[in-house]
Amino acid sequence: MKNTTYFNGKVILVVGLAKSGLAAGKLLHKLGAEVIVNDYKPLAENPQALELQELGIEVICGGHPLEIMDRKFDLVVKNPGIPYSNPLIQKALEKGISVVTEIEIASIISEAEMIAITGSNGKTTTTTLIYEMLKESKRVPLLAGNIGTVSCEVAENATAENILVTEVSSFQLMGTREFHPKIAVFLNLFDAHLDYHGTRNDYGLAKAKIFENLTSVDFCVVNEDDLEVMMLSEKALGTKVLFSVKKKVENGAYIENNCIYFQNEEIISLEKVVLPGAHNLENILAAICAAKLAGATTSQIVEVLSTFAGVKHRTQFVTEINDRKFYNDSKATNMLATKVAITAFTQPVILLAGGLDRGNEFDELIPDLKKLKGIVLYGETAPKLERAAVKAGLTFIKIVNNVTEAVNLAYQYSESGDVILLSPACASWDQFKTFEERGETFIEAVYKLAK
């Protein structure tokens, strides 16, 4: 760990707990900061706040009282999910106090160089691929970030012998000032989280903060096929390394003669790649670029691509029951992700979808819904998805109360050779705390059905 005195003596407010707030609070306290923690959940129902309180950290729970900001703070560290419209955050900004997320802390203290991966879709798959590809390199990779392990917690114990492979969201990137990866990967940009960011332009600018502090000795890995991503990377000072599924790019990864290449080196034939779905080719190419730049061997890359079949909750094969295959794609929290999942299959598909209502309609999905055998809907968006399914001409459209009921009804309607796919096209927060919880509920329902 470096810059161990950076936070010493500073008065820091941590707003919002969950995993990131808990980790940030503990680390900042350890580094000598005076930490005050504020969380909306009441103290009696808040084991994370109680844990911090036992360390001698002041906790204020049960709301976000504005009078907290009467104190003089050097820094505010907020949970990424808390919007900037929150009155407490607004007050901090009005007072000129920097508001950051915990990945800023990770970047400041990490002795290990960092690969940071962002984009609307494919982040988790790409992050996992890079991590696996680097396992035989000179530096030991550490998995961190939005993929499930808090970055500052990992960075605390990382050394120069490691390299952090970190998935970062637009929510996290908005709260950065000095965040500085060695390799920044920007996969794609589609409409997502507009309820948080307001406009697609602001969403794109938040993502583009991944490039903000790069220098000429750093690298930015960019999707040549995504015009917006290319435009957002124009001012990046790092060396640009491109990837494309459509054309040859000399300084990057591409497909030619049914093989994947990196900088004119043949890596692997497409027929040996086991990760399903054409959409994953972009993720694979981006991962190869980042891994190669970080020192991965070709043999390890080939080994990973020959064996890696996907990550949990992202078009994850669960099991087969009476010749029906069940797939968990709970991480599909927007329409594009669901479009991609539907097109990954040639078999008849019964789709399970629905979730948090963010105000949008689903007409954009209609061309893909036409390909389905049927659809089972649940959650706040069920009526909106039903309207889109009717417009698509589907004859089997059912609305149920929850994911478990959806699994059972889809199976009853299915036939031999069908795929039953959970790909919600919505966030999970109407019925679940996380998309992972939603996916686990689906898996549990499938295995219960199998019994």
Image: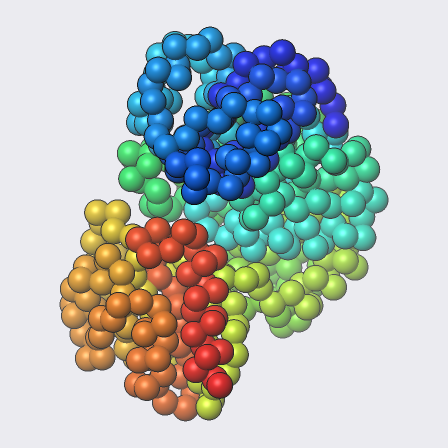
Residue 375 lies, in percent from the top left, at 28, 73
Say left or right for 28 vs 292: left
Q: Can residue 407 be seen in this view?
A: yes
On screen, residue 389 above or below 446:
above
Q: Is residue 91 left or right of residue 109?
A: left
Q: Which of 20 and 347 is in front in this view?
A: 20
**Residue ID at (53%, 18%):** 12
**How many numbered discs, if any?**
0
Q: Please determine whether, in this image, residue 258 is positioned above or below residue 172.
A: below
Q: Quadrant of the N terminus?
A: top right
Q: Position of residue 342 (x, y in %)?
A: 38, 68
Position of residue 106 measured from the top left corner of the image (x, y, whole percent): 63, 30
Looking at the image, which residue is at 79% across and 33% down? 160
Q: Could you tell me which residue is drawn at 41 percent across and 57 percent down?
A: 332
Question: Relative to the observer, which residue lies in front, 450 or 249?
Answer: 450
- Residue 140 or residue 336, whichever sits in front: 140
Q: In which quarter of the image is residue 198?
A: top left
Between 213 and 332, the residue placed more toward the observer is 332
Residue 240 % position (x, y) = 60, 35
Residue at image point 59% right, 31% down: 54
Q: Can residue 174 be seen in this view?
A: no
Residue 82 drawn above or below residue 7: below
Q: Quadrant of residue 276?
A: bottom right
Q: Would residue 259 appear left or right of 2 to someone viewing this image?
A: left
